[in-house]
């Protein structure tokens, strides 16, 4: 099992120097990944600085050598796929092939989409997500493509250079369990980053729900993807410096099929976007199970 730290792209972490410092501390302490949120405002009524995640992750990449880096998660429906493909490729090359690309609808929809005149219908956004993901995969081949979709167009273009990772960076898909459609989408890609209706962000999900989710995704893996590596990312707050308690919390989730533990604070935790809080937790190292 691998272990990551989950970081908002606002508050102290709107500053790229702070993200770089945290990434370096996490790598030194033995964490396997650092994943940033990808929000424009998150909550538009909150008065706080927000940073661009790809620029923040570039700073993290330049400060580290081995830790995996990416977003949890990027809302593909509010991005232009050709620009997003460039950003991911550039980061993958700067980092030497350490990028994970996680995608979803994103939210809150009214704040993140509606505030800027973007569509807010979630069925339409899901269409844009699926079409955008397919187009990203084509762009990352470096081949010349033409695409005439309902939402996106590309006319005889090739995006070079290619990412370092082949055939492309791993793609993880987010969604709320027990909603089935996002999980069927995830089954077509390389991993799933579920949130749970029964457990909010930063709350450990019930083991039986993780087991049911893993089984459901497994049943919907396409034949050509069966046997390929597939990541299941769950998270919460783990007990630091207490191996027995960490095993009791995380061990059953690993046995249920989880492959990553993502250390994440609840949304109402005052330390959520504070550098000192996350630096302290990073320095304690990942859970020992």
Image (cartoon, helix red, strand yellow):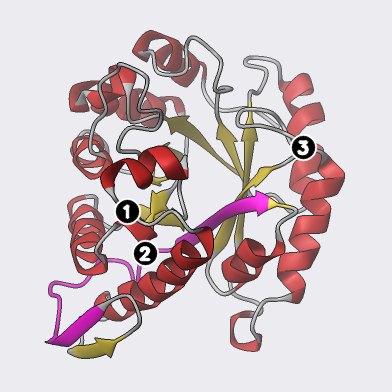
What range is drawn magenta here? 153-176
Q: Which residue is mark 2?
A: 169
For the residue pair 8 and 225, the one nearer the viewer reads as: 8
Q: Is residue 132 above or below residue 207?
A: below
Name the N-terminal-most of marks 1 and 3.
Answer: 1
Kindly report the distance in space between the C-alpha atoms of the residues bearing marks 2 and 3: 31 Å
Q: Position of residue 68 (x, y in %)?
A: 39, 46
Could one spot residue 183 in this view of the protein?
Answer: yes
Secondary element type, mark 1: loop
Residue at the extreme right of the image, as rendered? 208
For the residue pair 56 and 182, the one nearer the viewer reads as: 182
For the residue pair 109 and 193, the one nearer the viewer reads as: 109
Q: Quadrant of the C terminus?
A: top right
Left or right: 86 as drawn, with respect to 32: left
* Image marks 2 and 3: residues in contact by CB distance under 8 Å: no
For label 3, the crowd category at 10 Å Cα-Cα, with few meaning under 14, some 14 to 19 and many 20 or more, is few
For the residue pair 223 and 229, the one nearer the viewer reads as: 223
Q: Position of residue 123 (x, y in %)?
A: 53, 65
Name the N-terminal-most of marks 1 and 2.
Answer: 1
Q: Which residue is mark 1?
A: 118
Q: Residue 240's quadrant in the figure?
A: top right
Q: Position of residue 284 (x, y in %)?
A: 51, 16
């Amino acid at each position: 099992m691998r272990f990551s730290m989950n970081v908002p792209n606002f508050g102290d972490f709107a500053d790229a120097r702070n993200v770089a410092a945290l990434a370096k501390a996490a790598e030194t302490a033995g964490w396997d990944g650092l994943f940033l949120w990808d929000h424009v405002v998150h909550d538009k009524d909150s008065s706080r600085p927000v940073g661009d995640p790809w620029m923040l992750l570039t700073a993290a990449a330049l400060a580290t050598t081995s830790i995996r880096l990416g977003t949890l998660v990027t809302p593909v429906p509010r991005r232009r796929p050709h620009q997003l493909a460039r950003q991911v490729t550039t980061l993958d090359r700067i980092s030497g092939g350490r990028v994970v690309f996680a995608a979803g609808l994103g939210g809150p929809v009214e704040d993140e989409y509606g505030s800027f005149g973007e569509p807010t219908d979630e069925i339409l956004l899901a269409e844009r997500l699926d079409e955008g993901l397919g187009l990203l995969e084509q762009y990352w081949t470096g081949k010349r493509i033409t695409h005439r979709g309902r939402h996106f167009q590309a006319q005889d273009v090739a995006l070079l250079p290619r990412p370092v990772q082949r055939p492309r960076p791993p793609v993880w898909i987010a969604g709320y369990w027990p909603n089935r459609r996002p999980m069927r989408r995830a089954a077509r890609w390389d991993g799933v980053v579920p949130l749970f209706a029964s457990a909010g962000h930063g709350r450990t999900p019930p083991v039986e729900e993780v087991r049911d989710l893993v089984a459901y995704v497994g049943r919907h893996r396409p034949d050509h993807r069966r046997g390929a590596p597939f990541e299941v990312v769950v998270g919460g707050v783990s007990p630091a410096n207490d191996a027995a308690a960490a095993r009791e919390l995380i061990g059953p989730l690993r046995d249920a099929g989880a492959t990553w533990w993502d250390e994440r604070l609840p949304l109402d935790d005052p330390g959520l976007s504070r550098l000192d809080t996350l630096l302290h937790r990073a320095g304690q190292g990942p859970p020992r199970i």
